Amino acid sequence: MAITYADEKKFTQDQVHDLFESVGWQSAQYPERVYRALMGSDTVISAWDRDQLAGLARVIDDGEMLAYMHWVLVNPEYQGLHIGSGLIERVKEKYADYVFLEVMPEESKNASFYQHHGFTLMEDGRALQIVRPS
């Protein structure tokens, strides 16, 4: 199996939905909104096994100083193949000239994965969120 990476948004809504559903994310309940969000994002890097969407990373940026990596997900069938690492390294390359590249893992258990890639915990930082039902 040869995984290839792309920075074009060439995926379909169904492929995205299948990926989000495979990892059990709540976002999978909103396939149209997730697809539109990805299409409107500054950067989406995807990982492919031929025509199978194996993973993706989504980044929102201000064009100059701050890039925020919001989603990094890999289909469980492809986990353990370093696809997540490949996605993150490509994001880091693209945003190498930015002052800040940030990520907020939604589960604290994932922090060590990002630390392995050079991210550090923000001193005294806290994530805040408003969730609105659809």
Image (cartoon, helix red, strand yellow):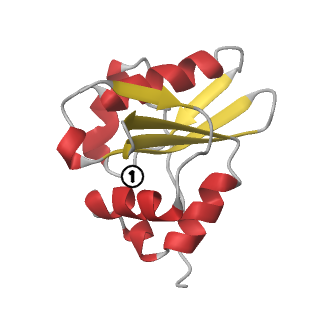
- Apparent side of residue 101 relative to residue 112 in the rendered image (left or right): right
Mark yes or no: residue 130 visible: no
Mark yes or no: residue 67 visible: yes
Residue at figure coordinates x 62%, y 37% from the top left: 8
Image quadrant holding the N terminus, namely top left
Query: For the residue marked with disc 1, what is the amino acid?
Result: Glu
43 and 26: which is toward the camera:
43
* Residue 71, percent from left and from top: 48, 47
Task: Answer above or below: position of 122 versus 44.
Answer: above
Q: Quadrant of residue 60?
A: top right
Q: Label 1: few (<14), some or many (≥20) within 10 Å?
A: few
* Residue 66, percent from left and from top: 71, 32
Residue projecting furthest to the front: 50
* Residue 120, percent from left and from top: 44, 24
Q: Secondary structure at mark 1?
A: loop
Residue at figure coordinates x 55%, y 64% from the top left: 34
Residue at figure coordinates x 63%, y 21% from the top left: 94
Q: Quadrant of residue 56?
A: top left
Q: Which residue is mark 1?
A: 106
Q: Quadrant of residue 77?
A: top left
Residue projecting furthest to the bottom: 134
64 and 54: which is toward the camera:
54
* Residue 50, percent from left and from top: 36, 36
Image quadrant holding the C terminus, namely bottom right
121 and 50: which is toward the camera:
50
18 and 20: which is toward the camera:
18
Q: How many marks?
A: 1
